[in-house]
Structure formats: structure tokens, C-alpha cells
Amino acid sequence: MRPVVAALLMAMCCPVACIGDVETPLPAELQAAQDALSQNLALGESLAGGPATAEQAAEAEKLIQDGLAAARSYASEQPEVAEAHHLIGMLLLFAYRPVVSTVTTTDDDGSTSEVTITSLRRGGEMYCEEGLTELRAAKTLVPKDIQYQLDYAEGLQACGQAQRSGNLLTALWLRAAEMTATEKTRAARLLALAARQQGQPHEEARWLREVVSNDPQDEEANRRLAELRASTRGTIAWLDYEAGMRSAQQQRRPVMIDFMASWCHWCKKLDREVYTSPEVIALSQEFVCVKVDGDRRPGLARKHRVSGYPTILFLGPKGQELSRVRGYEPTQAFLSDMRKALRPRGGIRQR
């Protein structure tokens, strides 16, 4: 189970609502909303990123709608109750929603095929404005509640506002002495993610070390720390979308964006067989390289007209599309496409 989702589920085990600074048992409507969110998160985690059946997709969506109806009904009558706003925001931004994706694969003989897959993915970019408003209301009503602060910070990250999230979390870290061990670990993990989204590997490593110091067995943090150490030994330096596009404009360099999905076999094959090639790694230094999980960032996939995975886009420094690769390509074919994308700039720089 993902650490943040596990923390959310653990936090939901205590059925209380915050009214002022007083904790009281949850009213029936809020308990129903909390149960719906817990069941939705458990369902999404049970699939581990794999395909969902039509019944599972319908159940996930129904849990969201039922939870929202209950929480909104209560919030309309009792707007001063922070937990009502909190639950609305959590259901909008963090619940698992059905996502339909088309996977395009290219075999070694050049033939292609498409498969449509439904999966459950956390987040909802289209609900960012309303979701953040509700989470902000909850933390404003109960400013001493660290859990509300952390949830709002994660909401900012989910909506592509890494810098604001980092600023909030940095200020919150000054209250680390007030945090439980679980809250400190989550705050450090979110600070690491904010640094990653802003293209700050040294800061990311700093906060990941904080995570590991609190929980030495944290597999996700240990794996990412190993990746960061490996980056100094010659691998592709992948950035988050926002950080990558800023870097491309500042450095006037082209961009290579890998749109992928965690369940995609051909994406993993590309990672394993193509992106590890010394020639590809060397040529990647001519680009700002960006990875985007299209299921987690469906708005970006739509913006760039991505309908299947993997899709690799080559963009100019200002974001104009130069070319794209649909599906898996062997190393030499991929190198050829990389070189073609560099031609508008007059070839490869001499180092």
C-alpha cells in the first residue's frame, strides 16, 4: 500500500469531527462520507494499478458520488464543521476514479495494435479549484490540525502547485516537534515530492533521507534515493513536467516527454531496454527530459493529444511539437528519432 494512502486510511480510523478545538463523534452524514472515501481508497489500492472491471469502476464512482452527497448536505447545514469541508476536498482530489486509456503497442516487426483498458487512478485535475477551496477551508477552521495542513499541501501538489506546497510544508516543518512520527514522515515525504516536482534533486534527497531516518524500512524512499544516487553515474535525468518546461525555456533546449503508465508493459520495456542504452543516455543530455504518468495527469495527456502509451513527444524550447513516437521502438530506431528532433536546432552541440 502506498505510504500516503496508508496514512489517510489510518487517519480515518478515528471517527471524530473538529468543531472549534473540540473533537466530537462524527455525525451520521460525515461518517457515511468517511466510510465511502475509505472504501474507495481500499478498492483502488487493491488493484495495485492494474485494470479494473466495469463493476469495480462503477463501484468506485458510486462511492465518490455518495460520499460527496452526504458531506455536501452536512456542509450546507453546518458550514463551521471543518471535517465536512475536509471530506469534500479529499473525495474530489484523492479518491480513485475510473480512467479509460488506449494502449498502443508496436512489435519488432513494425505491426501495431490498440487495447482499451479501464483503471482506477487517484486525483481529479478538473476538480482542483473546488477541492483546494474545501481543503483550505478545513485547515483555516482548525489551523492547529497538522493532518489538515498536510492534506492541503498534498492537494496543492496534485494540482501542479509544487512551489506553494513546498512553501507551506517548509513553514509547517518548523512545528515538527508537535508532530507524531507518522506526521513527520509524511511531511518529509511530501517535501521530497515537492522538490522533485521542481527539479531539485539535492533537496529531494535531503528530505528522503529524513523519511528513511524515521522509517528505515520505507521501500519507496529507499528506492528513490538509490535512483538519485544512480543519476550521478549516468542515467537519463528525468524531471517533472512543470520543472522540465521551465528549464527548457530558461536553457533554450528541446524537450523529450515520455508519456507512460505504471501498468504499461511496453513502457517498462522502453525503460529497461532503451533508456538504459549508453547512446540514448548520452544523446538525452541534449534535451530536457520529462516523464509524465498519463493516468495521474490526464489533463496533460489531453493537452498533448496523447491517446496511448508509451507516447514520446519531442518539443521545442517554447513548447511547439517537433515530432512524436507512438508505442515502443527498439534502441536504434529511437536514437534516429532523437537525432531528427535535434535537426531544427542545427544538430548536436559539441561538448
Image (spheres, rainbow, N blue to C red):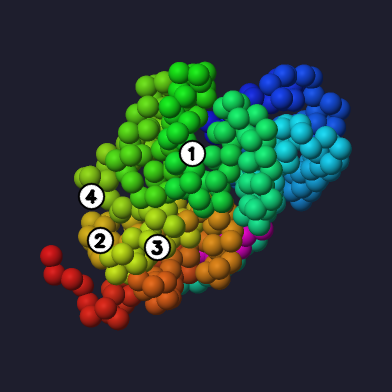
Q: What residue type is labelled 1?
A: Leu
In which quadrant is the C terminus drawn? Answer: bottom left
Residue to which mark 1 is pinned = 168
Find residue 285 and name its label: 2
**Which residue is labeled 4 in the image?**
234
Q: Earlier in the sequence, mark 2 or mark 3?
A: 3
Question: What's the residue at 32%, 33% (across, down)?
Answer: 206
Which of pointers 4 and 3 lies earlier in the amino acid sequence? 4
Q: In this view, does 182 lie to the left or right of 138?
A: left
Q: Earlier in the sequence, mark 2 or mark 1?
A: 1
Type of amino acid at the residue the image marks with label 3 = Met
Q: Characterize the local packing of mark 2: few (<14), some (14-19) or many (20 or more) Cα atoms within 10 angstroms.
A: some
Q: Residue at x 45, y 34 (%)?
A: 171
CA gap between label 3 and label 1 equals 23 Å
Q: Is residue 80 in view from this perspective? A: yes
**Which labelled disc corresponds to residue 230?**
none
Report the number of discs.
Answer: 4
Query: Magenta span covers which residues?
Result: 100-105
The image shows residue 319 at horizontal and vertical percentages of 42, 72
Q: What element carries label 2?
A: loop
Q: What element carries label 3?
A: helix
Q: Which of marks 3 and 1 is nearer the N terminus?
A: 1
C-alpha distance separating marks 2 and 3: 15 Å
Q: Main secondary structure of the magenta part?
A: strand
